[in-house]
Image (cartoon, rainbow, N blue to C red):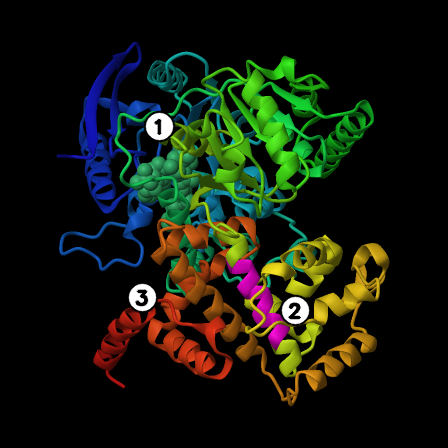
Amino acid sequence: MSTVHSSLHRTGAGAVAVLTIDNPPVNAMSMAVRIDLLAAVWDAADNAQVQALVLIGAGGKFIPGADIREFGKPQGAGPVISGREVIAALESCPKPVIAALGVHALGGGLEIALGCHFRVATSDCKLGLPEVSIGLLPGAGGTQRLPRLVGPARALELITSGKPMTAADAQDSGVVDELVDGPLLEGALAFAQRVLTKARPLQRVSERNQRLAGTDAALFTEFRAKHAKKWRGQIAPQRIVDCIEAACTKPFAEAYAFELAAFDECKASAQRAALIHAFQAEREAARIPGLSADVQPQPIRSAAVIGAGTMGGGIAMCFANAGLPVWLLDANPESLARGRALIEKNYATSVARGSLSQAQVDRALALITGTLEYAAIGDADIVVEAAFEDLVVKKHVFQQLDAVMKPSAVLATNTSTLDIDKIANATARPAQVIGAHFFSPANVMKLLEVVRGAATSPQVIVTTMALAKTIGKTAVLSGNADGFIGNRILAVYGRECDFLLEEGATPWQVDRALQGFGFPMGLYLMRDMAGLDVGWRIRQYREQFRDKALRYSPIADRLCERGRFGQKTGAGYYRYTGRDGSPDADVERLIEEVSREMKITRRAVSDDEIVSRVLSAMANEGLKIVGEGIALREGDIDAAYVHGYGFPRHQGGPMYWAAQQGWDIIHDTVTRLHAAQGALWAPAPRLAALAEQDRQTRALIPA
Ligand code: T1G
């Protein structure tokens, strides 16, 4: 079955061959598409009847890029055709070739379009080169042709961020020749007729150098310097800048070859594999095995949020940004006003940063309505409770929601530590209750940990998972257990860092090692930013349940006892001048004191040891969580950590990292520390079996 269908359409100016790319679900440019498309272009070019060609995607969806599933897989036995060969045929075609772009034209899809002589698009079409998000760069001419249309400075922004352009923006910047209001094919055929009638000269983008001429080399130096910190350790964004610089300094053919070499380097990198894993894991996380297909999400057209604090305000912004009207309820007018003011301040920051337009902000603000009355929110399709993290308070809120909310409403709680079932049982409808754990700042962080209670209905689960996509979140389903998925692993991550302090490391060394691995911020800087008193209050509450037989580090408590709560008190692990933290000898002395008390002989600790010990602990805990059914898959843990805890996406996630090291290596680390440290390092039940598999695989690899 061909993935490209050809049909002939007669226009007043001659016959047009329409080549329709048909490769469900999204018309990705697989090897089969490349083969079929090249053949179809050649046929149309050779067909004397044909005056022009139109490329269009089945269902009005153009190509979202090369088929990501083909990367890292061995090439099949059949013919191998590259995107570049298809583009060469399109660009050199003696007849006008028009790309008809709908829904999305991304990556190799936009590169195909840039190889055509003209482009028309529907106004909702998204155009972009997102390859950087999967560790690649546009390897079929995107770094050479796009700068020739939008200029090198804009191309640097677009290709290193991977962010798409709107069709209107693409038209303004000369990427799209015309926007089509009505049906896309008709619009494209009409455009083809006008090209033929006016005998418009064919525009080969690769020959348009005007926008590159006179580009100042400083553009690239400054751009590299501006992003150096953010791109630390990442290959693709750096290589993209090199390619665009080559476009401005070398003839097309030479720079085109330079781009291919850079593409191959990225394709061969471990980062590319990790980023494609992250891409697939976040999509896989949305699938819940075992739920019958009849269970469909109920529509969510309106929402309500209880509590106008930092989290409540951020959650309300998520709904408003998605175009959903949302009530924001609080107990008193002052906190409601404070909440509203914080929301407006956050939106003003987004406008200042250019991430939202004033018009978008005005639309969103108009959708957020404050209220003091529970009676006002009864008709909302979902309510998210974001009140104080206290069981008594939350139960009281849910009793009131039980009294006012319509029967079909989803009753969600944003708790990060409390038992969902205890909250649900405060109502007469526990089946409607679910955990919806947002991460701070809620309007920014992409992770939504959806926590199913013992009674939560399948429909409430699928409704909440689907809603996550609507409000731009990556949802991960968790069972109802202490710390759910994310915070349970975070506790292990923090624990091992603290123990390493007692054994010889310093907070600044630990942070340097974690940032070297790719975390945007080390643990101790993050704790100081969040405020050490939050964790202290939780530890003081949990002290009554703590197993005193297990090792416990008192360092954080000692800092809090001295009033060092972090940035907000000018000192925590670091000493602060404004928001800048610097190492503090007092803290080193405090840590050495604790080591002495714990009778621990301090020793040299390497950065590698810090990374491997902390990540091995996280992966071991992750296996336990999957084994207990709290998480559905290891990939879900990776998606949670990449989107909720700043885990470097180009490392794939803690479970992916461990699998890359080899579970036999992780097993050796875990069993060694289990022997030294005891129960805290108990190996996950599945670890030994996974290790044995990897040990056998490793034995097969010739030395
Ligand atoms: N290849 C293969 N499968 C793809 C795909 C692709 N490019 N894009 C999407 N899918 C699958 C996806 O896995 C999911 O499958 C289903 O389609 C729906 O996707 C030379 C080398 C297109 C905007 O990086 O950004 O071109 O999970 O759930 O929210 O320079 O998918 O259902 O089995 O995301 O509507 C560059 C990636 C490739 C774009 C649709 N292109 N895709 O979003 O649905 S590299 C990209 C997306 C390249 C050249 C280089 C989004 C989307 P399943 P979805 P959606």
Q: Is residue 422 left or right of residue 275?
A: right
Q: What residue does disc 1 label?
A: 61
Provide the residue designation for mark 3: 686
Q: Nearer the viewer, residue 680 or 670?
A: 680
Front position among marks 2 and 1:
2
Between residues 327 and 373, which one lies in front from this camera angle?
Answer: 373
Q: Nearer the viewer, residue 316 or 386?
A: 386
| x, y percent for residue 550 | 55, 73
**Chief SS of the magenta region:** helix
Q: From this viewpoint, is residue 446 visible?
A: yes
| Helix, strand or loop under label 1 | loop
Amino acid type at image mark 3: Arg
User: Dot 2, how many residues are within 10 Å of its Cα: few (below 14), some (14-19), or many (20+)?
Assistant: many
**Residue 53 percent coordinates (x, y):** 29, 26
**Residue 271 appears at what percent x and percent y?**
44, 62
Q: Whole-Å distance between the Cαs marked 1 and 3? A: 43 Å
Callout 1–callout 3 Cβ contact below 8 Å: no
In whole angstroms, how far apart are the C-alphas of marks 2 and 1? 45 Å
Hey, which quadrant is residue 192 in on the image? top left
Question: Does the magenta portion include 400?
Answer: no
The amino acid type of the residue labelled 1 equals: Lys
Disc 2 marks which residue?
511
Q: Earlier in the sequence, mark 1 or mark 3?
A: 1
Residue interval drawn in magenta:
489-499
First in sequence: mark 2 or mark 3? 2
Please name which of the two marks, 2 or 3, marks the residue nearer to the observer: 3
Q: Is residue 495 in the magenta section?
A: yes
